Image (cartoon, grey):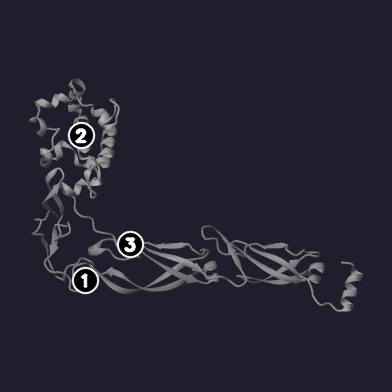
Amino acid sequence: MSKDYYNILGVAKDASQAEIKTAFRKKAHEFHPDKGGDESKFKEINEAYQVLGNDQKRKQYDQFGSSFQNGQAGGSQGFGGFSGFNQGFGGINMDDLGDIFGGGFGDIFGGSRRQKQSRGNDLEMGIVIDFEEAAFGTEKELSFTKNVKCSSCDGSGGAPGANLETCKTCGGSGRVSKIQRTILGNIQTQGTCPECEGRGQIYSSKCSKCLGSGISRENVRLKVKIPGGINNGESIRLAGQGEAGEKGASSGDLYLRIKVKEHKDFKREGSDIYSQQSISISQAILGDKIEVNTIHGEVKLKIPEGTQSGTIFKLKGKGTVQLRGIGHGDHFVKIKVLIPKGLNRTKKKLLEELDI
């Protein structure tokens, strides 16, 4: 009985090759036995894809149905069977399967790819700065321990004067073959050479300081500029200041997490600063000029006659530096009128006469 390969893959009869490939990968992931799927279903999906994924076989299938393979490649050992896996997984392009086995079929079935050197680790650390330092910017010197490029071999991993030689384990290919047992039978696989780590060459002798890794653990000092206007909780990324990668690989990044100390008089929102100023009842009634403390120093503020408690005045440009802009924010002063307590009889009488 002819099998409905389109139905098996869940695609329409006019589906494109891209749609067929996507459907196959999705179902192969779903039904792969190593992922808890149904082995017979997985084989059926593979059989369907071997036909529909090949334009010539697809045309024959559309004309004659699945029985057209009976005259090809010896029945069960043809495209519908699994004995051909050692010769290329039954005709399937390994890239079509993606990462069903976790590492991708490029590593399992070979190829000339060399191992990419691992980038160094990123680092993160916290730094505490004062309110004013966050407002205007500052420079700090950090001291910490990290992996750095080995100074003896300049990160190569080879001893001074050592020669680069072809790796004897892999013959310079960077890859070695082995037999891997799977549910589909024994498969010849290829992986990264453990001796040269995929480079194909090794030094005749290793660096005695880093033992061939190209990195060493050292204490470093680093001067860092903190930009003005930075807020509490923000981070600064210092590219390439993280840990060095092994054997010449690029370094990671350093992330500084900023903690800004609280100020006893000021609060901050963005680039604006808020504070509170107390005045006497007579200053509120008659008006006055008062000194207001800002991060820029003392500033005179005119209090108009009849100022009410809770009135807010703006001191333009007296806030922090704009982190991602030009100029400064503003300083907002909230007025608190002090109501006197414990007035003597004379003062009470005067207030009664004023009727305020």
Rendered residue at 23%/29% (across/down): 5
Q: Nearer the viewer, residue 66 or 282?
A: 66
In the shown orientation, is residue 16 left or right of residue 319?
A: left
Q: Nearer the viewer, residue 69 or 248?
A: 69
Rendered residue at 28%/25% (across/down): 13
Q: Name the kind of residue labelled 2 in the image.
A: Glu
Which class describes the residues within 10 Å of circle 3: few (<14), some (14-19), or many (20+)? many
Where is 199 relative to 96, above or below?
below
Percent from the top left, x then y, of residue 90?
A: 14, 37
Q: Is residue 99 visible?
A: no
Badge 1 or badge 3: first in the primary sequence: 1
Q: Secondary structure at mark 1?
A: loop
Q: Quadrant of residue 2?
A: top left
Q: Name the kind of residue labelled 1 in the image.
A: Cys
Badge 2 or badge 1: first in the primary sequence: 2
Q: Nearer the viewer, residue 258 or 186?
A: 186
Percent from the top left, x then y, of residue 184?
A: 15, 42
Q: Which mark is residue 210?
A: 1
Give the spatial CA distance, label 2 vs label 1. 53 Å
Q: Secondary structure at mark 2?
A: helix
Where is 287 relative to 190, above or below?
below
Which class describes the residues within 10 Å of circle 1: few (<14), some (14-19), or many (20+)? many
Percent from the top left, x then y, of residue 321?
A: 55, 63
Q: Which residue is mark 3?
A: 252
Q: Nearer the viewer, mark 3 or mark 2?
A: 2
Badge 3 or badge 2: first in the primary sequence: 2
Q: Name the kind of residue labelled 3 in the image.
A: Gly
Q: Which mark is residue 44?
A: 2
